[in-house]
Image (cartoon, rainbow, N blue to C red):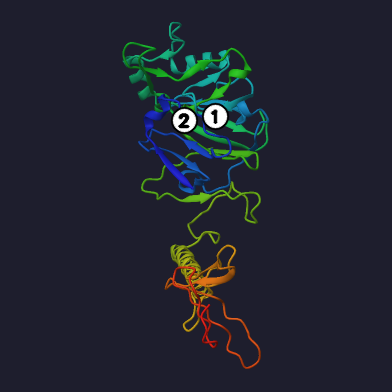
Amino acid sequence: MDTLRVPPTVRHHPPPHLPAIIRQKLTCSGLKKVLGSLTLGGYDASRRPLTDPFTVTLNPDTSRDLVVGLQSIEFSDAKTAGRQLLSKGIYTFIDSTVPHIWLPLDTCQAFENAFGLTYDNATDLYLVNSTLHDTLKRQNASVSFIVGNSINGGASVNITFPYASFDLQVSSPIVPEPTRYFPLRRANNDTQYTLGRTFLQEAYLTVDYERSRFSVSQATFADGAPVNLIPISSPNDNTTSTISTAKNNNDPNRLSRGALAGTVAGALIFFFLAVAATTLFFFFLRKRRQRRTTPTQGTTKDPPETDNSSSNSNSRRSIIGGELNVEFGDGKYRPPEVEGSPGSRGALVEAEGTRGGTEVEGTGAGV
């Protein structure tokens, strides 16, 4: 699970759309000088109330999946409390890629009357000059958005915004110089009703795409509170479902640092033992093969056979004088030894390189 810290200026520059399967939560807040955060695979329990937030089913239309029922908008200041700015409930889309809040025309006109705003036709924005800005700061008004599962009744949550949440700036190319403006836009029809990043400055959004549901709650900004990341489990796991609050870090499903270190050490030891065993196995296998191929002492190899001959490689056969003789390495031809009659030794024929006379041993006569 990863957490990205987003600087407050992100509310003026739409971030790229995140894949639906991994986008879990996006909160941008520059009002209290707290960095926005994006947590993948879980949520930061330190940034939302301890009570379980209500959940909403994702809209089947994936292009507008985070749809909530906007039940009412109430304006309050030192003189007025609970002034209604929304004539009737509407369904609106939470979209982190736009900075504005898009509402029906009559609601925008109610904002104009409450805050003294003037619509600029050239830019389609509510520009705020320095005089109006000082007046609104002294007014110290707040606006409450009540959102729920439906546009009337049922579970709901109140998200409150001080004027400072609407104090934004617009710059080139829309206007030549940086200018304050109130991030409210007039919607032409119900498909444009949108709660943009201005809404997410004070709201904490948690999305569980695998279970097709999400939750919205008032963002909390406790000074010095440590990050408390809680993973969102997969529905295939036998753990409790996601959108619930951990009141402390003693989650029984979370591994302690010691247990995690022991697991990693055990995995490394197993890996090195497996590598050592494999190396030794191949080493002994190679040695065994070498012993099989190496001849033992005291044994001789048979001489290689030559074509058309089964005799020694240092001799060759030839026909001399009509008789079969064998030429040995000393250049002499001798007939092969043949078995004679019983008691005889056989005959030895000697030829010194020519077909001269031969001497037959045992006869004493020359031929």
Name the residue tied to disc 1.
145
- The count of marks equals 2
Residue on which the image places disc 2 = 161
Amino acid marked by disc 2: Phe
* Residue 305 appears in the rendering: yes
Give the residue furthest to the top.
122
CA neighbours of label 1 inside 10 A, class few (<14), some (14 to 19), many (20+): some
Q: Position of residue 293 (x, y in %)?
A: 51, 72
The single residue placed furthest to the bottom in the displayed view is: 343
Q: Horizontal placement of 235 versus 101: left or right?
A: right
Q: Amino acid at mark 1?
A: Phe
Q: Nearer the viewer, residue 246 or 130?
A: 246
- How far from the left and from the top, in percent, is residue 247? 51, 54
Q: Which mark is residue 347?
A: none
Q: Secondary structure at mark 2?
A: strand
Find out whether the residues at labels 1 and 2 contact each other: C-beta distance under 8 Å.
yes
Note whether residue 69 is visible.
Answer: no
Relative vertical location of residue 266 with respect to residue 25 in this rendering, above or below: below
Q: How far from the left and from the top, in percent, is residue 164?
A: 39, 27
Residue at 46% over, 45% down: 2
Give the mark nearest the N terminus, 1 or 2. 1
Residue 276 point in image, percent of width and height: 46, 69
Q: Please report the residue visible at 38 percent of the width from the left and 37 percent of the height from the top.
A: 35
Residue 249, above or below 98: below
310 or 64: nearer the viewer: 310
CA separation, marks 1 and 2? Answer: 8 Å
